[in-house]
Image (cartoon, grey):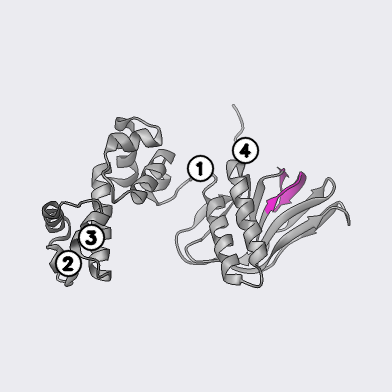
Amino acid sequence: MTAIAYVPTALVRLDEPPAPAAVGVGIHGPAGQVDEFRLPDLWQFHLYDYEADLTVDGVGHEIRPGSVSLVPPGTPVRYRYRGRSEHFYVHARLGTVGSPREVPTVQHAGRQAAQLTGQLRQAVAAWPSTPGRAVAEVWAALWRVAELAPPHDRNTPAATHPAVAAAVALIEARLAEPLTVPEIAKAVGVSHNHLTRLFRTATKETVVGYIRARRMAQARHLLRASTLSIPAIAATVGIPDLQRFNKTCHRELGASPRAVRAHLA
């Protein structure tokens, strides 16, 4: 029987922005081959550009360029360097609200490494003169890291299967356009029937039902929160035929567009 490798993980909540205490570039190695430390109150977020041995809370990892680590507060770490070692680092407090996401403490970014490098380089450039920009870049980078590994138990429909995630992203980007299940399936690289099965498993509804629900949620928002004309809203949500838009509003929102706008439904 093949042994299953233990992959340490951390639970992170990213529904509110992080609060960085420090953002920068760390250079290690010349002053010593080993570092041992912990941050009692802050998370450690690192993107590495070197090879080294890293131990996190007693579990060993081999890091290489493109590796990332996300270590909870109070966790001891030990680095054994192999020469000059440079990495981006963020020491921050993370949010405490929202659903927790299980993220490996150490993993490789793969094809996302270049994007992460760009985001953290921008964060370093913005810190501390423009901290808001730095926070935005760090937050986006943390979300990217949180989505590197396959999900174990997330309560989001899009995370159950990569094809569903890709389909949801495509639907959100093209709500104003005509959409068919076959073309969505082709765009995400699966068959029509397979996408239908995956989508129902993930969302408990059909692809067509999901599209309709998202269009109507957007229509309700625009009717109540904007002064856009009803024809413009109908076009924005991909139902430019006003008669069809009216019928869909009655069926899905329980009232006409004018009544929804008047907060009567």
Task: Give the crowd class for mark 3: few <14, some 14-19, many >=20 residues within 10 Å.
Answer: some
Which residue sits at x=59%, y=35%?
Answer: 4
For numbered disc 3, what is the local secondary structure?
Answer: helix
Residue 150, which numbered label? 1
Q: Is residue 29 in the magenta section?
A: no
98 left or right of 22? Answer: left
As helix, strand or loop, the secondary structure at mark 1 comes to: loop
Magenta part, dominant SS: strand
For marks 4 and 3, give the one nearer the viewer: 3
> Mark 4 highlights which residue?
5
- Please report contact status of discs 3 and 1: CB closer than 8 Å, yes or no: no
As shown in the figure, which amino acid type bears the numbered disc 4?
Ala
Which numbered dot is residue 260? 2
Left or right: 95 as drawn, with respect to 166: right
Can see residue 43?
no
Earlier residue among tags 4 and 3: 4
Determine which residue is flagged by label 3. Answer: 232
Residue drawn at the location 24% of the way across and 66% of the way down: 228
Task: Give the CA distance from mark 3 to mark 2.
Answer: 15 Å
Mark 3 to mark 1: distance in Å? Answer: 39 Å
How far across and how far down the image is residue 221, in percent?
A: 27, 64
Give me the C-alpha separation between circle 4 and circle 3. 55 Å
Query: Disc 4 and disc 2: Cα gap in Å?
Result: 54 Å
Q: Residue at x 28, y 47 (%)?
A: 177
Between disc 4 and disc 1, whose residue precedes? 4
Left/right placement of residue 153 relative to residue 192 reads: right
The x and y percentages for residue 11 are 54, 56
Residue count near mark 1 (Cα–Cα under 10 Å), binned few <14, some 14–19, many ≥20:
some
**Disc 1 residue type?**
Pro
